[in-house]
Image (cartoon, rainbow, N blue to C red):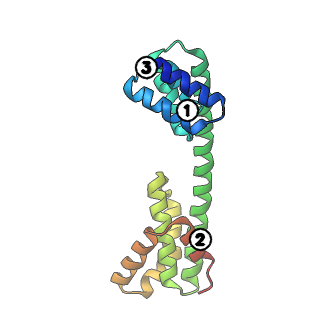
Amino acid sequence: MSSIEGLQKAIQAARAGRKVEARDLLIQIVEINPQNEMAWVWLTGLVDSLEDRIIACENVLTINPANQKVRVFLEELQSQQQSLLEDKNREDAITLFNQEDYAGLAAAEARSGKALQLAGYAAALRESIGAPLPPSEQARVNRMIAPAREALLESIVNAEWETGRSLELDQAIELALSTE
């Protein structure tokens, strides 16, 4: 099958609602001919993730920088991506403050292991999103969890901290809300 026949078959599949078939055909086409602008244009609407749509648009614009429709679509996609990132960062920040405060509460209640795990989780999340605590806030967190650090041997403190660093979000929330 020629590239033109493959493209026609993919477009027919897309128009008939057979998205997966169309996408698979188009991917085969761009693997053989990465400069096929029309295949990339169709892929912008058929790939599943926002990131893949952005990549498809960028490929179209690499081939044809004058494609204004795709340029406008790319700007819309990048705006969506930025909004999602801002929402996620906001959610992460709320999670962080909650986890740090729950760590302080656990330390005050003499639940040292729980306090250190929650503080370790928050520290790991801060590192992963590039949001270090300002020095005054770090001092506050350190003061809150100091009783937990002082109540345990250093090796246990380190083990609890590392356990917290390896928690997933749902595990950290479950730990924070647990009464044990």
Name the foreground residue: 3 vs 175: 3
Instruction: Give the residue at mark 1.
Output: 22
Q: Secondary structure at mark 3?
A: loop
Q: Residue at x 51, y 73 (%)?
A: 118
Instruction: Give the residue at mark 2.
Output: 173
> In the rendered image, which quarter contains the N terminus?
top left
Q: Secondary structure at mark 1?
A: helix
Is residue 41 visible from the viewing direction of this image?
Answer: yes
Is residue 147 visible from the viewing direction of this image?
Answer: no
Above or below, 106 relative to 4: below
Camera-side mark, 1 or 2: 1
Instruction: Give the residue at mark 3.
Output: 2
- The image quarter containing residue 28 is top left
**Does label 1 or label 3 sit earlier along the sequence?**
3
Horizontally, residue 166 falls left or right of residue 88, namely left
Where residue 53 appears, as percent x and y from the top left, is 54, 33
Cα–Cα span, label 1 and label 2 = 41 Å
Q: Residue at x 54, y 81 (%)?
A: 107
